[in-house]
Amino acid sequence: MTRKPRLHIPLPPARPGADPDFSYVERVAAGEVARPDPHTRIRELSNDLIWRMVGVLDDEGVATGPWDPQLDLEHLIFGLRHMIETRLYDDHMLRMQRQGKISFYMKSRGEEAVAVAAAMALKPSDMLFPSYRVQGLQIARGRNLVDLMCQCLSNSKDMCKGRQMPVMYHWKRGNIFSISGNLTTQYPQAVGWAMAAAIKGEDDVAAVWIGEGSSAEADFHHAMTFASVYRAPVILNIVNNQYAISTFQGTAGGEHLPFAARGPGYGIPGIRVDGNDFLAVYAVTAWAAERARSGTGATLIELLTYRMDAHSTSDDPSRYRPKNEPEAWPYGDPVERLKRHLIKFGQWSESRHSTLIEEVQKQVEAEWQQAVSYGTMTEGPFLDKNELFEDVYADMPNHLILQRQQMLEYDDLREGH
């Protein structure tokens, strides 16, 4: 009997009303995956890097195995503080959106280690090409929350001058490229920047982040080809948080192979890492950075994590996944796991943790008050309307000169001049 081909439709393992099902996520004990020399040729790298997963923190909070970066107490507390700051900033901005103070927001709850640990593993001069949901990059590099808040408020201090939707930050001094709402454009941009750095003989690398859904975009494949052919000093991150807006990660290809497996097809090493393990993310990023700086080439990193909250304030995740699914994620919460690690070795306590949360909460609230002093969506001071016509042309063309004059004349009429 001849079988006919059937179209396969990837389906999520659980829908609303069902019990969470993470049976597709293989549990890998921390410390089991070997750490190769960063300069190892791709053909000599173990497939364990792709099929299994790099982890450092075990279930008891003990750091184990060859990937342990052995960070000192100062660095660990620095990372914990900035993950907490990222989370409390997110929580505050969500409340402000619900109160109508800002128009839109996207939280990163559950993914804070993806950004904060990576930023700490890189040099300040390395160029970062973020997607949304990695605001921890800004915070770990020392960005004042007031700057981020003003961008979301589109007020007189908005870095984007009202021309971008909220959370589309940039920071030239901090070497963080502008976020784009057109998904995956930053992948070829990062590769191009890295190629230019290599041409100039510089020691800096580029690092870029996209979600797993974005890896289905054509720009992903273009970037991978250039990164491979020219051995660009770039770190290519795929944040696999299980959902692209409302679409399960299997729709982008994660049902058949880990996203890290896409690297070797292009001649690029692929590494799968526990994205909720702060130490593992730090270690793998540092490994990839050493590889890039030495001229060995790019690395593709799949960070396995979970989006605990809605995709954005425009999304209702209860319509496409079980309500209690976040609590069932087998790799836990990155903040709690790093806290447990510090407590395990007598370097931290629940009371010190609570004090830190209270301190950061007061900081966030004070910075919000400063941010709204520069204006809100409904209260001044507002952006100068003349800026609508600036920053595009070196010499303003006649049609914009005319439009600006018409705007000024309309304002005079409205004010009765």
Image: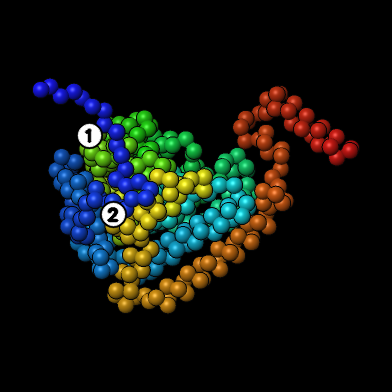
Instruction: Say left or right for 414 vs 325.
Output: right
Q: Is residue 400 positioned above or below 115 on the image?
A: above
Q: Earlier in the sequence, mark 1 or mark 2?
A: 1
What is the spatial separation of the Cα atoms under label 1 and label 2, in whole angstroms? 22 Å
Amino acid type, callout 1? Gly
Residue farthest left in this picture = 1
Instruction: Say left or right for 195 vs 55.
Output: right
- In this view of the protein, which residue sits in the foreground, 393 or 97? 97
Q: Position of residue 168 (x, y in %)?
A: 52, 44
Q: Residue at x 76, y 32 (%)?
A: 407
Q: Position of residue 121 (x, y in %)?
A: 35, 55
Q: Is residue 236 visible?
A: no
Are there few (<14), some (14-19), or many (20+) residues within 10 Å of tag 2?
A: many
Q: Secondary structure at mark 2?
A: strand
Image quadrant in which the C terminus is located: top right
Q: Residue at x 28, y 68 (%)?
A: 61
Dot label at residue 274: 2
Dot label at residue 265: 1
How is the model colour-coded?
rainbow
Q: Position of residue 112 (x, y in %)?
A: 40, 56
Image quadrant in which the N terminus is located: top left
Amino acid type, callout 2? Asp
Q: Secondary structure at mark 1?
A: helix
Residue farthest right in this picture = 417
**To which quarter of the image does residue 191 belong?**
top left
- In this view of the protein, which residue sits in the foreground, 38 or 113? 113
Instruction: Say left or right for 357 vs 192.
Output: right
Marks 1 and 2 in Cβ contact (< 8 Å): no
Q: Residue at x 47, y 35 (%)?
A: 182
- In this view of the protein, which residue sits in the foreground, 216 or 382? 216
Are there few (<14), some (14-19), or many (20+) residues within 10 Å of tag 1?
A: few
